[in-house]
Image (cartoon, grey):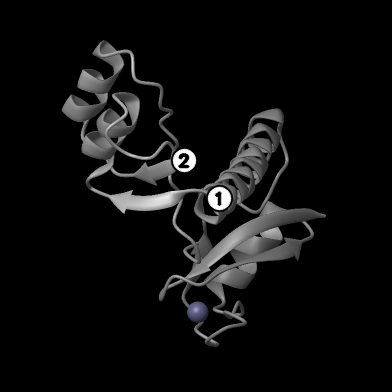
Amino acid sequence: MIRFALKCACGHRFDSWFRDNQAFEDLSAAQRLSCPACGGASVAKAPMAPHVASGPRERGEDEAANSLAVLRETLLRVRDAVEGSCENVGTAFAEEARKIHYGESAPRAIYGDATDEEAAALAEEDITFARLPWVSRGDT
Ligand SMILES: [Zn+2]
């Protein structure tokens, strides 16, 4: 038995088992294959099916996807912690961080946005801050 990743004319992807490649060719030629999603008989082998893992390279891709998901989860938790314990100063971050550093503002934990230039300037003035990858919630 051999499993092929298939694709219908409208782009639905699915897997199907065949006795061998010839069996697939025969069914295909006789239009006896149909898409389970739309019933379309125009079905061809899909060259790349991300959900069919059969080799080391593809397993590696799965792992990469997994660690990305884990990383995203971690970053979301960092974001929660920051939002829960720091004051959001938005785009005034660089200005506010500088004021706190020079004692012009009450010392407190803040977060917000800074441009690359602002971040570079802060670093030059020896102002302690950290840049975090900010992940958005709820997207896929
Ligand atoms: Zn279809």
Which residue type does callout 2 highlight?
A: Ala
Residue density around tag 1, few if under 14, some if 14–19, many if 20 or more, within 10 Å: few
Q: Residue at x 24, y 34 (%)?
A: 94
Q: Secondary structure at mark 1?
A: helix
Q: Is residue 34 left or right of residue 88?
A: right
Q: Residue at x 52, y 56 (%)?
A: 46
> Where residue 88 sits in the image (x, y, percent)?
38, 53
The single residue placed furthest to the right in the displayed view is: 1
**Residue 128, picture quadrant:** top left
Q: Is residue 20 visible?
A: yes
> Where residue 31 sits in the image (x, y, percent)?
54, 79
Where does the N terminus fall, quadrant-wise? bottom right
Which residue type does callout 1 highlight?
A: Ser
> Where residue 96 sits in the image (x, y, percent)?
27, 39
Instruction: Please report contact status of discs 2 and 1: CB closer than 8 Å, yes or no.
Output: yes
Residue 109 disc label? 2
| 90 to 138, vertically: above or below | above
Residue to which mark 1 is pinned: 85
Q: Secondary structure at mark 2?
A: loop
The residue nearer to you, when weighing 13 against 116, is 116
